Image (spheres, rainbow, N blue to C red):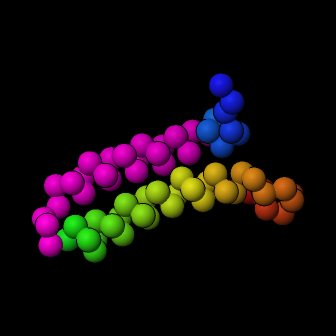
């Protein structure tokens, strides 16, 4: 099975776990917040992993500067 380079990063794995945890946590939110706050939290945590994956595809040394 092919594995992308970002899938080997511990920080990406932790971001995926955070996202899973937030989905479980937001399931317990009251119905009034389901469409506002719940959606925003879920999108934000998914964005962390997506940004890490996107960042690994950058090619220049300037992009990978620490």
24 relative to 44 in the view: left or right: left
Q: Is residue 35 above or below residue 29?
A: below
For the view shown, which residue lies furthest in the top direction?
1
The segment highlighted magenta reads: 9-32
For the view shown, which residue lies furthest in the right direction?
60
Instruction: Identify the residue at image location x=64%, y=51%.
Output: 53
Instruction: Identify the residue at image location x=61%, y=39%.
Output: 7
Quarter of the rendering containing residue 36: bottom left
Is the magenta region chiefly helix, strand or loop?
A: helix
Say if the magenta span includes residue 28: yes
Say if the magenta span includes residue 4: no
Instruction: Identify the residue at image location x=84%, y=63%.
Output: 62
Instruction: Locate residue 12, reporting x and y percent.
Output: 56, 45
Quadrant that contains the N terminus:
top right
Instruction: Locate residue 60, reporting x and y percent.
Output: 86, 59
Quarter of the rendering containing residue 51: bottom right
Instruction: Locate residue 57, reporting x and y percent.
Output: 75, 53
Q: Is residue 13 above or below residue 55?
A: above
């Amino acid at each position: 099975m092919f594995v992308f380079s970002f899938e080997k990063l511990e920080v990406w794995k932790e971001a995926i776990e955070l996202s899973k945890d937030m989905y479980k946590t937001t399931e317990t939110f009251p119905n009034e917040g389901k469409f506002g706050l719940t959606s925003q939290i879920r999108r934000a945590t998914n964005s962390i992993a997506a940004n890490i994956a996107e960042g690994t595809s950058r090619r220049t040394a300037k992009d990978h500067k620490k």
